[in-house]
Image (cartoon, coloured by chain):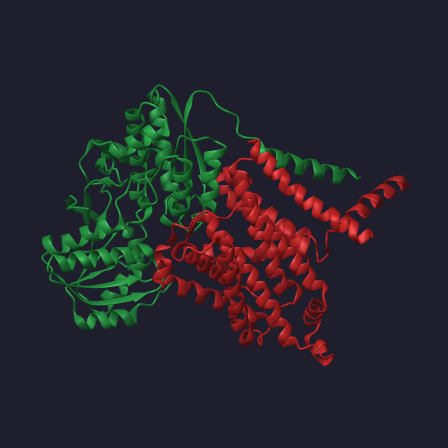
Amino acid sequence: MANKLSGLLKVALLVLVYAAVQFLEGRGILLPYHVQILSLCCINIILVVSLNLINGFTGQFSIGHAGFFAIGAYLSAYLTVKLQLPFIPAIICGGILAGLTGLAVGLPALRLRGDYLAIATLGFGEIIRVIILNTDAVGGARGFSGIPKYTTFGLAYLTAIITVVVIRNFVASDYGRACLAVREDEIAAESLGVNSTYFKVLAFALGAFFAGAAGALFSHYLQYMAPTPSQIGFVKSIDILIMLVLGGLGSITGSVVAAIVLTVIPEFLRGFAEYRMILYPILLMAVMIYRPSGLMAGRELTLKGLTELFKGAKTRAYHS
Amino acid sequence: MSYARIKSIVVCVLLVFALTVPALAQGDVIKIGLISSLTGSVSTYGQSVRNAVTMAVDDINASGGILGRQISLIILDDKGDGTEAAQAARRLIDRENVALILGPVITPSVMAVAPICQAAGVPMLTPTGTGDQITTVGDFIFRGAYKDSFQGRIMAQFAAENLGLKEAAIIYDVANDYSVGLRNAFKTTFEELGGKIIAEESYSTGDTDFSAQLTSLAMRNPQALFIPDYYSTAGPILMQARLMGMDAVMLGVDGWDSPDLSALAGGFEEGGYIVNHYSGDVDSPVTQGFIAQYTAAFGQAPDALAALAYDGVMIVTKALEAAGSTDPEALKQALGTVEAIEGATGTIKMDPEGTPIKSAVILKITNGKWELVDRIDPIGR
C-alpha cells in the first residue's frame, strides 16, 4: 500500500513539474529561453543516465557516447528532412540504429578492459564522426542544416522520464544485479554462472539506444548539426563523462542532478565573458575535491530518503 | 535544519531567481546583442571582433547615438560552439529584447543561431561568417563578409588572369567545410577560365605530416599550389613543400592571415599570394583611421576579423538610420538594401540575399610582410 502511494506521489510530482512549466510559460514568466535550457537539461539527463548504465552500473569505462548520440541525431534528422517521417518514429529509429551499433561495437570491444576499452570506444566515436564528415547525404563537413524544430519541452521531458524509469528498473532487475556483479568482480561473477559478455553487451546496447534517442531530440532542438568535436566528437563524450562523474558513478539521481547543474551553470556564467571558462573548471575542481566520489556518491535521492532526512534533521535539532 | 543547510537552500533559491527574473527594462536605448567566441579554440577571433565592435559602438554613442538614441551593447560568449551560441541567441531575444544580433563569429555557430533569429523575426548579421549556406536560412539573416565560394573564385581568377597560370594543384582539408568549399570554387572557376587542375590531394583536420601528399604533388610539378586552410595547417604545408623542393607559386586564402604564419612556415611563406577581406595598405581615410584608433586602443594592429566586425557595426548603423526605427521588418528591408557604406574593408553595398558586394584584395608576402598587389571586383555572384 505504501509502495503504491509513493508511486502515485511520484507520478503526481512529475506531472506537477510539467504543468508548472506549461503554466509559467503561458503566463510569460518562463521565456522560450528558459524552456530551451530546460529541454537541454532533459536531453543531457538522458545522455548521462544512459552512460551511467554502462560506466556506473556495469563498470565498463566507455568514452564514445557521443558516437551513439551522433548516430541518433543524424539518422533521425535524415528521416524527418529527407523522407518526411514523423518525429516519434524517427526518434525510435535513431535509438534502434544506435543500439544495434552498440551491439556490433560492444561484442568485440567489450573483451577489452579499463584503459584499453576507453581507447577503443574513443576510437569508435571518432570513426562515427569521420563517417558523418564524409557522408554528403547528411551535409558532410558543411553540417546538416534545415532540420525542423520538433523537440518540445514536453517530449524531451517525457523521454527523460522514460529513460530514468527504464534504466532504474533494469538496474533493480535480475539483469541489473548481474551487471553490478560484473562491475564488482568479473571473475567472481563468471564463476557464479553470470555470462559477463552477455550482460556487458546488453547494458552497452541499451545505453547506446537511449543516447541515440537523445541525439534525435538534440538535432531537432538545435536544428543544425555540425560534425565538430564539441558537437558530436570526443569533446562531447568528455562533457557527458564529466557530468556523470560529478553526479557520482552508479547513482541515477546523481546523474540527473549533475546534468541539470552543469547545463545551467554555464548559462549563469555567460555574462563573465573570458572568465567564464575559468570559473566553470574551478567549480568542477571544488566539487571533486570536497566530494571525490561525486555529488551523490553512489547513493540515490528518494522520496523516502528525503522524508527521513528531514525527520532526522528534526530529531537531531531536538537533541542538540 | 542546520544553519549551513538553510544557507545553501537560500543560495539555490537566489540563483533560480536570478535566472528567471527578466532583465529590467532600460530607458530609451537601442539594444544590440553581440555573440562572440571569447573562450574556446577560436577565442582570438572572438576577442578581435569584440574589441572592434565595442570601439565602434563607443564612437557612435559619443557622437550622439543613432536616431537620437544610445546603443546598449550586450556581449555574450559562445565558446565557438553551436549549442552555446543557440542559448546565447535565445537569451538575447527573450530576456534582453534586442533589436538585432551581431555575430556569431564562425560558421557552425552562425548556423545554430540563424534558425532561431529567423523564427523569432529578429534580424541578425554575422560580420565574419563566410559559409555559403548561412544566408539561405532566411530573409532575416545577413553577413558582412564575402562567401567562401566568392573567395575561391577570386583566387582562381587572379591565378588564371593576372598570373597567367595554366596548371595548378590543390591540397585541402577534406574534413573542413571551409577548405572544401574553397577548393570547389577554385577548381570550377580555374577550369572555366581555361586552366587545368593537374593533381589534388587531401588530408584531415589535425594532421601534421603532409609529406606523402606533397611527394605525390611534387612529382606532377605544378605551376601553382592552392592551399585553402587556416594558418595553423597552411604554415607546415608551406614549409614541407618548399623543403621538398617544390617551386610552385603558393596560393592561399584569408585563413592564412595571422601573425603566427611566419613562425609555422619557417619563412617559406615568402612569395605566396592570398585573398583577403582587407589590407592595411589600402589608402582610404576610413581604413587608416580605423587602424590608428584600434592600435591606440588595444596595443596591436587589427586583423581582418576586427576590420570586418567594425564594418558590421557600420552596416547596422546605416541600416538603422535608413529604417528610421528598430522595427524588425523595416530593419530587415534596410539591411538588404543599404549601400555606399565606407568601411574599413572598402565600400560596401548589401544585396537583398544578405551578402555584401565589395571588392577583395590580393596580398603577396614580400620580405615577411603582406603587401597589397591588387583589388579585384566581383564578377557575377
Location of residue A221 in the rendering, given as x and y in whole percent from the top left corner: 48, 48
Q: Is residue A113 above or below residue A308?
A: below
Quarter location, residue B101: top left
Location of residue B163 in the rendering, given as x and y in whole percent from the top left corner: 11, 55
Q: Is residue B167 above or below residue B355?
A: below
Quarter location, residue B266: bottom left
In the visual, does A185 lie left or right of B329?
right
Residue B166 in view, yes or no: yes
Quadrant for the C terminus of chain A in the image: top right
Residue A61 in view, yes or no: no
Q: Is residue B318 above or below residue B12?
A: above
In the visual, does B6 lie left or right of B13?
right
Q: Is residue A131 above or below residue A299?
A: below
Chain depicted in red: A
Chain depicted in green: B
Location of residue A113 in the rendering, given as x and y in whole percent from the top left corner: 60, 73
In the visual, does A289 lie left or right of B352?
right
Give the mark count: 0
In the visual, does B377 lie left or right of B1?
left
- The residue lying toward the viewer, choosing from B245 and B351, is B351
Which residue shows up at 60% across the image and 47% down it?
A: A260
- The residue lying toward the viewer, choosing from B266 and B2, is B2
Which residue shows up at 54% across the image and 43% down it?
A: A37
Location of residue A82 in the rendering, given as x and y in whole percent from the top left corner: 38, 57
